[in-house]
């Protein structure tokens, strides 16, 4: 019916890719303008989290011996925290993206997916910077401790993991952004839920499937195999095999398809209901 | 491609009242529904727009006017794709740019230059396109050296200028403009009008929503009057403005006439005002050069020894044009209780083309008390045959001194009304 909304979603999104780039760039510019450390914050946040958890698990509680990990704990924590920060920052950005851009939603037409996608995009930029610091960290532990790093071809698999995570995040981000537009409680709930979710995922300690309810949660949670896969590929040199990662891929794809379908179906109501 | 935009029987309805504002409300109402306490609680809907049809050809400028809440913005949002119609169809041929809120995407922490790229992208321009037009945009905006300053330090007018300048350089096939020109100074407004005319001349279809009737008339070819979500009138801008104002003025008139705070009690009523042309017949439209007679009928509830009658005339844009008061001519009427008529004769009505609205006031000169007052509801159109714009049509004659000879189209062309009367 309408020239703009009739075309197919992919070609429309491609047409607006420069807008997506501009919005990501705006987010980054605005976030790091008028801040002394600027982009360094992208590294400092996961790094300080890593130091906190290292302190907690090696000095305060001293459970590291029982954590059953084959690598130095700071490396373990950092490889979990960086992708987790990407995930949580993306969701916390997406959930508010439509409401925060109310002016644009009610005044200008373009595909509304651009808003949650741009939140994910700007979180990805931080992820990329924080991730590159990992090289230095690995070097430090390789030369400074008995632990040795063996580069393997498994490293090439990392982009696939990033993609799976991004697809899952985008699907969830669209659902959350839409839900928050209708009910502002979603954003508050997400703040709590994301904290809980982190401890249900192997971000700062390993989680084993031992058949208890705990293990079942871990299996259903697609973030566990995703985070685990980063560690396997980068630090252990193996490509994630087995059902857990595959099922995470399937969950990610389904979330994305459902999220996008629902988002597009509802998007004509956004301007009225926001 | 004969049609740039086509609206066929478009309708849009909204719900009254708020949507569930929080999840708590939703859970509560869902709970009630499950228990069966709450029978169908369908919020009533209303039609913001109904059965609207019009089309626009490339290179045509359509104005949309109407009172607040008439559905103007809804129509534009439907057209822009922000809202979806509940009825009817909308066709847009080509690229559409909406200057509905040009500053919507701006961010105060970014510089003017950065905001140009951002706004441009939001308007659908590619980076390369913006780059190639960057100098034009900056020059048009008149921002100058401040282009590298964060926009939060700009004045409101500067921000608006920056937004409009960017938007004005999108090359659309259809351009929507909604009341954005009201900001910015006079010089910038002129430039915007020029720019819009240029775009229309080059084949862009323009839809212009505004409350500035004068501006609308100077830009648009055709005008649509919306009222209560319906198409109330389509026609030439001047006729449309006339229709719109007549409807609004009467509505305002009915309201304020009943409980005019200034008169309070009713010692008199104005019954009507008539305009008569040169031949004495009643007219609604006059030529500036022809004589005009105004007749005012009124009724008094008590004897007034020294009655003065006043009429004031406004142009449609709101400018007060002239006030005629019998006391200023040294005339008062000794009027007993009852019905009376007075007459004002003018040798000419040398005003510019447009719609004029008159008010009538009756005064008791002894007590300087207002007996009756009407709103601006008596309409008179002046037809200057499209000879010019401006507030006045002045009698004048052109000639040349020695070096050149004037070439006359006809024998002699001059507007030649009777001499103007000077005000005492």
Image: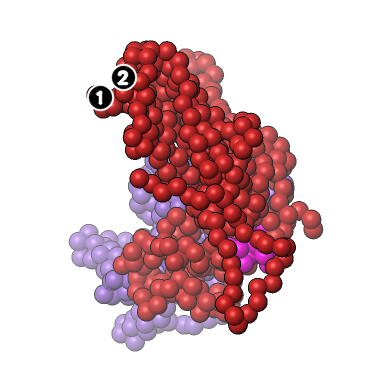
Question: Residue B195's x, y, as percent?
Answer: 56, 66
Q: Are marks 2 and 1 in contact (CB under 8 Å)?
A: yes
Question: Residue B293's x, y, as percent?
Answer: 54, 35
Q: How dense is the environment of label 2, judged by Cα within 10 Å: few (below 14), some, or many (20 and up)? A: some
The answer, for residue B71, to whether it is visible in the render is no
Residue range in magenta is: B196-207
Chain under label 2? B
Q: How dense is the environment of label 1, judged by Cα within 10 Å: few (below 14), some, or many (20 and up)? A: few
As displayed, is residue A201 above or below residue B383?
below
Instruction: Report the quarter where the N terminus of chain B lies.
Output: bottom right
Q: Quadrant of residue A7?
A: bottom right
The front one of A57 and B163 is: B163
The answer, for residue B126, to whether it is visible in the render is yes
Residue under the point 48% across and 55% down: B180
Tally the marks: 2
The front one of A226 and B102 is: B102
Chain under label 1? B
Instruction: Report the quarter where the C terminus of chain B lies.
Output: top left
Figure chain in red: B
Residue under the point 61% across and 63% down: B197
Question: Residue B118's x, y, as percent?
Answer: 48, 67
Q: What shade has chain A been given?
A: purple
Q: Which residue is mark 1?
A: B366
């Amino acid at each position: 019916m309408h020239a703009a909304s009739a075309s197919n979603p992919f070609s429309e999104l491609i047409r607006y890719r420069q807008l997506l780039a501009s919005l990501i760039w705006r987010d980054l510019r605005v976030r790091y303008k008028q801040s002394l450390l600027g982009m360094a914050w992208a590294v400092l946040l996961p790094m300080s989290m890593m130091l906190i958890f290292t302190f907690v698990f090696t000095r305060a509680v001293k459970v590291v011996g029982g954590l059953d990990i084959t690598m130095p704990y700071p490396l373990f924590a950092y490889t979990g925290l960086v992708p987790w920060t990407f995930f949580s920052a993306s969701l916390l950005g997406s959930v508010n993206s439509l409401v925060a851009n109310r002016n644009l939603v009610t005044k200008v037409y373009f595909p509304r997916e651009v808003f949650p996608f741009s939140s994910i995009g700007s979180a990805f930029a931080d992820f990329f910077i924080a991730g590159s610091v990992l090289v230095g960290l690995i070097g430090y532990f390789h030369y400074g401790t008995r632990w040795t790093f063996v580069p393997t071809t498994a490293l090439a698999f990392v982009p696939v993991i990033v993609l799976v995570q991004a697809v899952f995040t985008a699907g969830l981000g669209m659902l959350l952004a839409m839900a928050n537009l209708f009910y502002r409680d979603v954003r508050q709930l997400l703040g709590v839920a994301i904290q809980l979710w982190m401890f249900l995922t192997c971000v700062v300690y390993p989680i084993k499937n031992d058949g208890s309810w705990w293990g079942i949660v871990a299996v259903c949670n697609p973030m566990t195999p995703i985070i685990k896969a980063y560690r396997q590929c980068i630090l252990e040199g193996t490509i994630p095999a087995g059902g857990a990662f595959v099922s995470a891929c399937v969950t990610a794809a389904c979330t994305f398809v459902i999220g996008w379908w629902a988002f597009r179906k509802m998007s004509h109501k956004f301007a009225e209901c926001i | 491609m004969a049609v740039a935009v086509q609206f066929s029987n478009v309708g849009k309805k909204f719900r009254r009242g708020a949507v569930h504002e929080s999840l708590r409300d939703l859970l509560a109402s869902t709970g009630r529904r499950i228990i069966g306490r709450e029978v169908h609680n369908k919020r009533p809907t209303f039609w913001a727009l109904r059965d609207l049809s019009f089309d626009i050809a490339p290179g045509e400028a359509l104005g949309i006017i109407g009172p607040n809440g008439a559905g103007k913005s809804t129509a534009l949002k439907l057209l822009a794709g922000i809202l979806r119609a509940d009825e009817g169809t909308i066709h847009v041929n080509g690229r559409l740019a909406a200057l509905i809120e040009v500053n919507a995407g701006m961010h105060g922490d970014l510089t003017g230059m950065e905001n140009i790229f951002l706004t441009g992208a939001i308007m659908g321009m590619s980076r390369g396109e913006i780059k190639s037009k960057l100098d034009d945009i900056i020059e048009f905006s008149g921002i100058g050296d401040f282009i590298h300053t964060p926009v939060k330090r700009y004045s409101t007018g500067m921000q608006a200028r920056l937004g409009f300048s960017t938007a004005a350089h999108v090359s659309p096939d259809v351009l929507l403009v909604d009341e954005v020109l009201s900001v910015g100074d006079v010089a910038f407004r002129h430039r915007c009008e020029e720019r819009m005319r240029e775009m229309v001349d080059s084949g862009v279809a323009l839809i212009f929503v505004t409350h500035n009737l004068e501006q609308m008339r100077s830009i648009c070819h055709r005008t649509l009057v919306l009222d209560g979500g319906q198409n109330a009138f389509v026609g030439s801008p001047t006729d449309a403005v006339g229709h719109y104002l007549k409807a609004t003025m009467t509505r305002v008139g009915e309201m304020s006439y009943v409980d005019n705070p200034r008169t309070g009690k009713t010692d008199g009523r104005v019954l009507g005002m008539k305009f008569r042309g040169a031949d004495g017949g009643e007219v609604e439209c006059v030529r500036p050069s022809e004589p005009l007679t105004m007749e005012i009928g009124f009724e008094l509830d008590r004897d007034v020894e020294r009655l003065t009658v006043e009429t004031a005339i406004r142009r449609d844009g709101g400018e007060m044009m002239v006030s005629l008061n019998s006391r200023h001519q040294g005339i008062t009427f000794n009027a007993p209780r009852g019905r009376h008529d007075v007459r004002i004769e003018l040798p000419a009505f040398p005003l510019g083309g447009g719609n004029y609205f008159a008010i009538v006031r009756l005064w008791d000169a002894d007590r300087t008390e207002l007996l009756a007052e009407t709103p601006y509801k008596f309409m008179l159109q002046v037809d200057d045959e499209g000879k010019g714009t401006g507030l006045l049509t002045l009698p004048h004659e052109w000639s040349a001194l020695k070096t050149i000879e004037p070439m006359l189209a006809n024998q002699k062309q001059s507007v030649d009304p009777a001499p103007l009367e000077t005000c005492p």
